[in-house]
Amino acid sequence: MMRIGHGYDVHRLAEGRRLVLCGEEIPYDEGLLGHSDADVAVHALMDAVLGALALGDIGKLFPDSDPAYKGANSMKLLGEVIALMRREGYELGNADITIIAERPKLAKYIPKMRENLARAFGCDIGCVSVKATTEEGLGIAGKGIAAHAVLLLEKK
C-alpha cells in the first residue's frame, strides 16, 4: 500500500531572525518569522507526511499557541513526525520539495539540505529532492519564502 501527501507553507522574511531551510542555516540578513525556527520547507514536508497519513497538519500536532514550541528546531519536530509515520507502519518512498524564494539564492545549499533530510528519514539521498525557484518577481516570494512538498509513503 502506498500513500501520497502534499504540504505547503509560507513565512514572512523578518530582520533579527535566522534563516533555516531543510535544517541548514543560510547566511542572510533576514530570516523567517514564526513561532518555531520557521523552517518553511520542513513544515511543508511534515504537512505532506501528516496529510498522507490523514492525521491533520503540524498546527494540530504542534500548535503555535503552545509555548513548548516557541523557537523549536523544526528538524526535531520532523523527527517526531517520522516516528509517528513509522508507528503507522510506513517508510518514505521519496520526497520532492520546492522552495520558492526571490532571495537569497539557494543552489549552493541544496546538497546539504538533501543530506539533512535523508539523514532524518534514514534513507538514501536519492530518495530526497530539493529544488529552489523564484516567482520572477510576481508573487509572495519577494516578502517571504514558501515551500511545497510532495511525497510517497510505502507500507512496511
Image: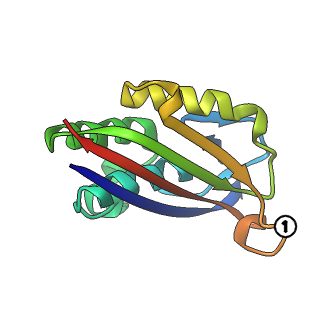
Is residue 60 found left or right of 11 in the rendered image? left
Q: Is residue 39 visible?
A: no
Q: Is residue 111 visible?
A: yes
Q: Residue furthest front?
A: 1
Q: Residues within 10 Å of mark 1 (few under 14, many from 20)?
A: few
Which residue is located at x 73 percent, y 65 percent?
141
Indicate the quadrant containing the C terminus: top left, top right, bottom left or bottom right. Answer: top left
The amino acid on which the numbered mark 1 sits, given as a three-letter code, is Glu
Q: Position of residue 11 (x, y in %)?
A: 59, 62
Is residue 58 found left or right of 29 in the rendered image? left
Q: Is residue 156 above or below residue 13?
A: above
Q: Position of residue 74 (x, y in %)?
A: 44, 42
Q: Which residue is mark 1?
A: 136
Q: Is residue 83 above or below residue 141?
A: above
Kind of element beneath mark 1:
loop
Q: Position of residue 83 (x, y in %)?
A: 23, 36
Residue 64's quadrant in the figure? bottom left
Between 122 and 106, which is closer to the camera in this rendering?
A: 122
Q: Is residue 145 above or below residue 81?
A: below
Is residue 16 found left or right of 10 in the rendered image? right
Q: How many marks?
A: 1
Which colour scheme appears in the figure? rainbow
Q: Is residue 109 above or below residue 154?
A: above
Which residue is located at x 15 percent, y 44 percent?
88
Which residue is located at x 84 percent, y 67 percent?
136
Q: Residue furthest bottom?
A: 138
Q: Position of residue 128 (x, y in %)?
A: 51, 36
Is residue 134 found left or right of 12 in the rendered image? right
